[in-house]
Amino acid sequence: MEKEKLNCLKQTAAQIRLDIIEEVHAASSGHPGGSLSIAEIITYLYFKEMNVDPANPTWEGRDRFVLSKGHTAPALYAALAEKGFFSRDELKKLRQVDSFLQGHPDMKGTPGIDMSTGSLGLGFSTACGMALAAKIDNKDYRTYAIVGDGESEEGQIWEAAMFAAHYKLDNLCVVFDWNGLQIDGPVTEVMNPTPHDKKLEAFGFHVIAIDGHDFDAIEAAFEEAKTVKGKPTAIIAKTVKGKGVSFMENQVGWHGSAPNDEQYAQAVAEIKATM
């Protein structure tokens, strides 16, 4: 990737991290850890990969995106605001009763949301349905989804994977955010769903494993996915929960906790130092 574009994406990812911290601090609740871990992935999707139009969020020809791990909505909201779907001022209203930014994505109230999610496992199934609809209607839009590693313990994830392969959904690309931690602890200790690569290959997926914080690797993976015919693609992205904030990184306690004022100030300073 050319240096100028890479620097631009890095700056956007840092801004999204900053907005995530702003959101959960203002709300005094939310899920910063898993939101921070997908900052690069969601930045690349909205600012390089996907064909979307903030002026026309329901445009029929748009690419679709489903955040199956819906509790990490702060990352999605930050990307949508940065892209221009709504004012950045709305971010400070996360989870407030007069806000359209609920704790989980709401397709009926929030511009740019293609599917309401929160019940783990359901979002990936919906993404499969969107991809099949494109096939049936002879449309060329692509569908993308992000699934959590803890979420992949849900049986519905694997039913959806079977469905995607059966219908040869080569217009579908799912990213598994492998940060290794879920609300109750390390994923492999709670209910080990690994090995994702071999399981997904057995289900009929084309599988790519990457560093989920490396934009060059992310770009190569999404470009490769678009060349795959006759089967869906799964990208297994190794990430760090709480990435970008030193005291949150790899700490399970930050799955669903908001920083206090002192922690907020430190987090903001650390992120701004990278910008």
Image (cartoon, grey):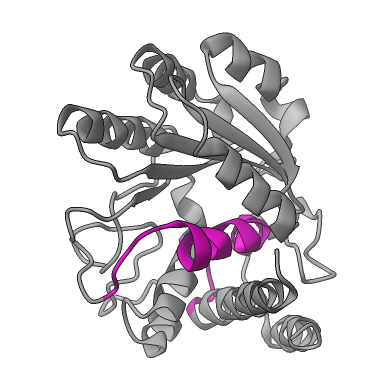
From the viewer's perspective, is residue 8 above or below residue 175? below
Please tell me which residue lies in front, 134 or 247: 134
Q: Quarter of the image containing the C terminus?
A: bottom right
Residue 193 showing in the rendered view: no
Please tell me which residue lies in front, 62 or 188: 62
Image point (36%, 59%), residue name: 51
Q: Quarter of the image containing the N terminus?
A: bottom right
Where's residue 249, x and y in %? 80, 60
Q: Which quadrant of the figure has residue 22?
A: bottom right
Q: Which quadrant of the figure has residue 52?
A: bottom left
Where's residue 125, x and y in %? 35, 30
Compared across the picture, whether 272 is left or right of 112 comes to right
From the viewer's perspective, is residue 143 above or below residue 132? below
Compared across the picture, whether 104 is left or right of 183 comes to left
Image point (61%, 37%), residue name: 235
Image point (39%, 71%), residue name: 95
Residue 250 showing in the rendered view: yes
Magenta span? 27-54
Please tell me which residue lies in front, 231 or 202: 231
Where's residue 48, x and y in %? 51, 64
Where's residue 209, x and y in %? 72, 35
Q: Main secondary structure of the magenta part?
A: helix
Q: Is residue 261 magenta?
A: no
Compared across the picture, whether 136 is left or right of 83 comes to left
